[in-house]
Image (cartoon, coloured by chain):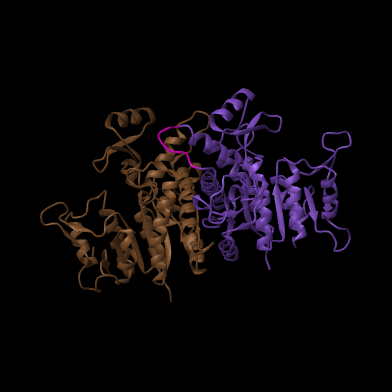
Chain colours: A purple, B brown
């Protein structure tokens, strides 16, 4: 039986640092991501792609507020639009490599808990970086919360609640079963809660690694592949004792996480998503760069990224 | 065996004349459309929805050009974004009536011929209406082609080539077979041609009635339901001899079309899509308002819209 891998790609894999987000930039980046995914399929895996939308949804918000001629849409509908935008670009890129109709992107709604404390503490950066003065001005004019990000300037931050369920999970499964590469949960999914006002659309952006982990658990996927800009997780990052992690167990990863080795805004959420997936019947989680994705998954190749393997049962409590 | 109906809804069913396109307006309009579709499902039909995007894609284009901070995307990617936007709103509205996961929207690419003469003759109006002076100014500043529309002012017009194929048709069929209501081909589909530059993305907006007709033919659907603002097709519209059309044959509809009864920018494309569908094994085409949709399809109800029925074989050439 063919195994299924859920691949999580960052929005900044499609609009890279220093890029402004033109169509040509995104097309080239989508082609690079399609190559990485192509290698995974060639290794015999079925693939579901979950992409982020941080740069794109923030850009869209800026454009929406840029003219008085047309009303701006709320954040969840901007995420819906980025699912169309990036779903189209990724599907095209994959179809150009593997034939028309291979990939299909579905508009995906993800349920969240309206009582999630994340609604009171915006933490997810979206859109471009600003100088401090410009950030303060935008925050005041538009009611944004802004925070410093990655030492590269200030960004708008929005609420990022925990994903609880995936509305379109049956449709997703039907398409995977029919042999399609499915692009789902883009931007972490369009957040909804029950039947609240505005059709339950929630003013938030869900973390795409968490959404990918949830989709992997609901599908019963064997592998969760978290694509990032670096080849491997690091211990003692930036210190003289710095070292890279190759193959480790979930128990080891949990210990490193508890020791504070993986920062909250960076590798922390990826390791948390990996551990949760492995605690729930997942076999393997991978954290690596696009180039090493297939080699790390299969264990072939001279160099590979970080493989986190399910711990032997009863060997050590993993949480 | 359950029969399948493809329902085509205009973008102006979701942003109505005089509305600016706020989220709340679109949510209310989507709820009304969901009610009409709900009645069709209750009558025992499977449904595929194809929605237009004229007002929304034009609005998005205005917003994209409204700020220098972020690059504007080309027209096909704006259509992709409206598939996300309107797909989300329609799926939510249907799920609120029929349960979570009933509906699923897929990002749909539709192939066009790069040699289609429509690329040299923009004809499809998008976005808001402008006064003549403002329209002239925008045309000059942004390289638009503008034309008068419906006697209500000037609008931007773009190329609208004939849809030739649907890239995601297999995925669409798999979802229909799995019992989902599928929203596909939004905005007429994202137009692509082969492997041209920019991933083959074409600078155009496909007519949604034509796309709906193509999808209906490819799926082997039994009915094509073209939703509009009026209850019935009219003969001698606006003249003292004006009359409404109830049930007619394809041959009769073809004769009225040839006589110029249905204007090119209005009912003409709907009747053409209906006739092409009926010539290719379709059983019934309906042109009516949302309120009369289910009653016209089933032939029940006191009042119904226009039913165009397949002509008896060999009775009369229908084209």
> Would you say A49 lies left or right of A236 here?
left
In the rendering, at what x and y percent does residue A203 appear?
57, 45
In the rendering, at what x and y percent does residue B10 appear?
36, 52
Looking at the rendering, the stretch of residues picked out in magenta corresponds to A67-73
- Residue B189 in sight: no
Q: What is the quadrant of the N terminus of chain B in the image?
A: bottom left
Q: What is the quadrant of the C terminus of chain B in the image?
A: bottom left
In the rendering, at what x and y percent does residue B145 appear?
32, 35
Residue A116 colored magenta? no
> Would you say B158 lies left or right of B132 here?
right
Q: How many marks?
A: 0
In the rendering, at what x and y percent does residue B49 appear?
42, 59
Seen in the picture, residue B177 relative to A57 is either above or below; the reply is below
> Would you say A71 lies left or right of B227 here?
right
Q: Main secondary structure of the magenta part?
A: loop
> Would you say B139 lies left or right of A46 here?
left
């Amino acid at each position: 039986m063919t195994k299924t891998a859920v691949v999580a790609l960052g929005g900044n894999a499609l609009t890279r640092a220093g890029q402004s987000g033109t169509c040509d930039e995104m097309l080239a980046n989508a082609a690079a991501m399609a190559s990485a995914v192509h290698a995974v399929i060639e290794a015999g895996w079925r693939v579901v792609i979950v992409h982020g939308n941080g740069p794109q949804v923030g850009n869209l918000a800026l454009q929406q507020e840029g003219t008085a001629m047309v009303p701006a849409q709320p954040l969840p509908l901007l995420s819906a639009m980025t699912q169309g935008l990036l779903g189209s670009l990724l599907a095209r890129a994959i179809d150009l490599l593997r034939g028309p109709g291979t990939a299909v992107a579905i508009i995906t709604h993800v349920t969240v808990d309206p009582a999630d404390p994340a609604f009171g503490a915006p933490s997810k950066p979206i859109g471009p970086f600003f100088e401090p003065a410009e950030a303060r001005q935008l925050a005041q004019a538009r009611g944004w919360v802004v925070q410093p990000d990655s030492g590269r300037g200030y960004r708008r931050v929005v609420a990022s609640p925990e994903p609880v369920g995936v509305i379109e999970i049956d449709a997703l499964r039907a398409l995977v079963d029919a042999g399609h590469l499915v692009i789902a949960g883009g931007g972490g999914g369009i957040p909804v809660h029950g039947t609240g006002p505005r059709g339950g659309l929630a003013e938030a952006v869900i973390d795409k690694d968490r959404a990918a982990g949830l989709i992997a658990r609901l599908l019963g996927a064997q592998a969760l592949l978290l694509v990032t800009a670096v080849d491997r997780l690091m211990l003692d990052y930036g210190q003289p004792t710095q070292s890279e992690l190759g193959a480790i167990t979930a128990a080891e990863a949990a210990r490193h996480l508890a020791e504070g080795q993986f920062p909250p805004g960076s590798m922390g959420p990826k390791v948390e998503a990996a551990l949760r997936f492995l605690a729930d019947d997942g076999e393997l989680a991978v954290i690596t760069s696009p180039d090493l994705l297939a080699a790390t998954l299969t264990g072939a190749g001279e160099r590979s990224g970080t493989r986190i393997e399910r711990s032997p049962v009863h060997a050590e409590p993993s949480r």
